[in-house]
Image: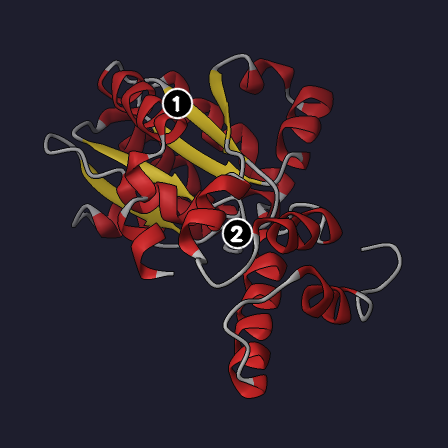
Amino acid sequence: MSSRKENFINDKRRISYLRSVYTRMYRGQSVLIEGAYGAGKTRFLELIKPKKLKTVWLESLDNKHEILASILQELNYEGVATHWHTSRNLKKICSLSGFFAVIDEANDLDRRVWPYFKRIIDAEVPVIFAGLPNVRTYLASEHPDILSRLKVLTLYPIVVEDFINEYKNISSEAIEQIYAATNGDMRKFEEICIECLDKAKELKYSLVDINLALTFLSDLPPNH
């Protein structure tokens, strides 16, 4: 998949989104990037490399004390991850500039950390969240005030046509059937395409046709 990776930024939607993210960040505003599994959220986050702002990557599984302390530590300030230092750490973060925070897998965040992020967002420290669609659902229900402060960008998987161009040895009909059978789960989609190519090589077929693809799709769970 190396060529698709190289062409990733050539996708028009992602180019537009990247510009939007930079515009928001330089204004001190925050963004929520949502998408299903395999939509390319993490890869998109890795494209965000502004020259004027330092990137601070955060671990979504950390508790609020650890998250606040790690922001300060990444910026070369003292940050102690304890309850007693939480308020002081938050105030220090809100007084700083010249950086933005990135939270991948935002769906794993402890619910108690969101009010702290609200304070950080209101201090015009840009935060880029990425997660499953249930992040927006949760915020709409529990923290609509935070959601109103975020620009939501929805990432969709690279379209089927790109894979037709990528996999010259798989018929377009087979590609379309694999995509439909995997319900847009791009990791599963790639996995089956590669398995089909391996099987075709083993059988000395020059092309993965619809019949060969169907032998793999019949093994999928009915509700997949």
Residue 86 can be seen, yes or no: yes
Picture quadrant where residue 23 is located: top left
Where is residue 155 shown, x and y percent of the image? Answer: 50, 33
Residue 79 can be seen, yes or no: no
- Is 82 positioned to the left or the right of 70 in the image? right
Tell me if residue 188 comes above or below residue 74 in the rendering.
below
- Is 201 positioned to the left or the right of 199 in the image? left
- Is 3 positioned to the left or the right of 214 in the image? left
Q: Where does label 1 land, which residue?
A: 30
Q: For residue 77, which numbered disc appears in the image?
A: none
Secondary element type, mark 2? loop
Q: Label 2, label 1: how many angstroms apart (C-alpha)? A: 21 Å
| Amino acid at circle 2 | Asn
**How many residues crowd mark 1 within 10 Å: few (<14), some (14–19), many (20+)?**
many
Identify the image quadrant of the N terminus. bottom left
Q: Where does label 2 land, which residue?
A: 63
Where is residue 118 shown, x and y percent of the image? Answer: 48, 24
Q: Nearer the viewer, residue 213 or 64?
A: 213
| Amino acid at circle 1 | Ser
- Residue at the farthest right position: 222
Looking at the image, which residue is at 22% across and 19% down?
A: 26
Looking at the image, which residue is at 64% across and 47% down?
A: 176
